[in-house]
Amino acid sequence: MSIEVRNLEAGYGLKPILRDVSMRVEEGKICALLGRNGSGKTTLLRCLNALIKPIQGQVYLRGQDIASLSRVEIARMVSVVPQSTSAPFNYPCLEVVLMGEAARLNPWSAPGEVARQRAKGVFKLIGIEHLLDHDYNGISGGEQQLVLLARALFQDAPYMLLDEPNSHLDFSNQHHMMTLMRQLAKQHGITMLITLHDPNLAFYYCDEIVLMRQGRLVCQGPTIEVLTDINLSAIYGNNIQTDLTSRGMQVVVPKGVVMGAVEQTLVC
Ligand SMILES: Nc1ncnc2c1ncn2[C@@H]1O[C@H](COP(=O)(O)OP(=O)(O)OP(=O)(O)O)[C@@H](O)[C@H]1O
């Protein structure tokens, strides 16, 4: 159940964004994709979900080249939590989550009572039962993100791609969700790729890190080995560094900030 990318070159139209990207994530691992805005993280996730066809190179899921799989076969294997929460539809949240069943249904059939009960179980797991009957477009951005996460969990696929799933979540929900993701990856062997902007979330919850810069993979490896000061400044510039908390936890902090006072101008 690994994900493997070999020598991938891909982009939009004739413009390549990703160049020579090769990586592998083993079953049950959570891998964080880190990189600055525009470095190609979302584009890579789109390739893994076959939304973008590579110019060169291959993506393998379960050892199968996804170019040989149908859309339905891919949808049965890959669930996605997209970056944007906006939707052209305005269904009740329960119906939005039930859409996660689409790839398993016969044409013109609808999810039955068993599926509905299972979907309600996912709402409970995430702690959003109160949203079941709300209209999707009538809830907050963070609540929409939790509903999309519920849809991905309900889809029950062996691969999960999450594009900044925390961007609208409050501090508590960010950690609740990442803890849940980690439990699911470990208990059910789900392989996850997740784009993050907070390297600390990667430190706490992810097994591996892929660092990207300008469409290229800079390095991949175990979190503790990759999130070094040298690698972080190669990606983000020299205004952040690693540090140890009084409890011995490794964290990433801005340089030159002491108790709310900026000692030096942050340099990007
Ligand atoms: N639909 C598109 N058509 C053309 N170019 C695009 C499209 N989407 C993204 N790009 C370009 O591809 C590059 C990589 O974008 P991508 O969204 O993959 O970056 P990212 O690392 O996910 O960024 P962010 O952290 O800001 O979400 C950027 O230069 C972007 O402008």
Image (cartoon, rainbow, N blue to C red):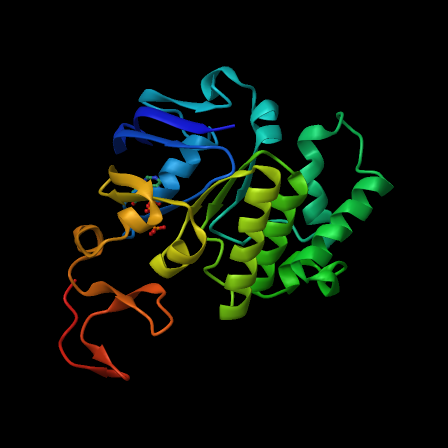
Residue 95 pos. (x, y %) = 73, 48
Whether residue 226 appears in this view of the structure is yes
Residue 66 pos. (x, y %) = 47, 21
Q: Quadrant of ligand 1?
A: top left
Identify the image quadrant of residue 139: bottom right
Out of 86 and 251, give the one closest to the viewer: 251
Whether residue 141 appears in this view of the structure is no
Q: Is residue 149 left or right of residue 119?
A: left
Instruction: Determine whether 128 is above or below 68 in the image.
Output: below
Instruction: Determine whether 254 is above or below 49 in the image.
Output: below
Q: Is residue 143 left or right of residue 102?
A: left
Who's the residue at 65% across and 39% down the image? 155
Out of 162 and 106, give the one closest to the viewer: 162
Residue 177 pos. (x, y %) = 55, 57
Q: Is residue 98 left or right of residue 1?
A: right
Q: Quadrant where the C terminus lies? A: bottom left
Who's the residue at 68% across and 48% down the image? 96
As drawn, the residue found furthest toward the right would be 113
Q: Is residue 90 left or right of residue 6?
A: right
Residue 49 pos. (x, y %) = 48, 32
Who's the residue at 14% across and 66% down the image? 267
Identify the image quadrant of residue 152: top right
Q: Count the labels in the image.
A: 0
Instruction: Determine whether 227 is above or below 158 in the image.
Output: below
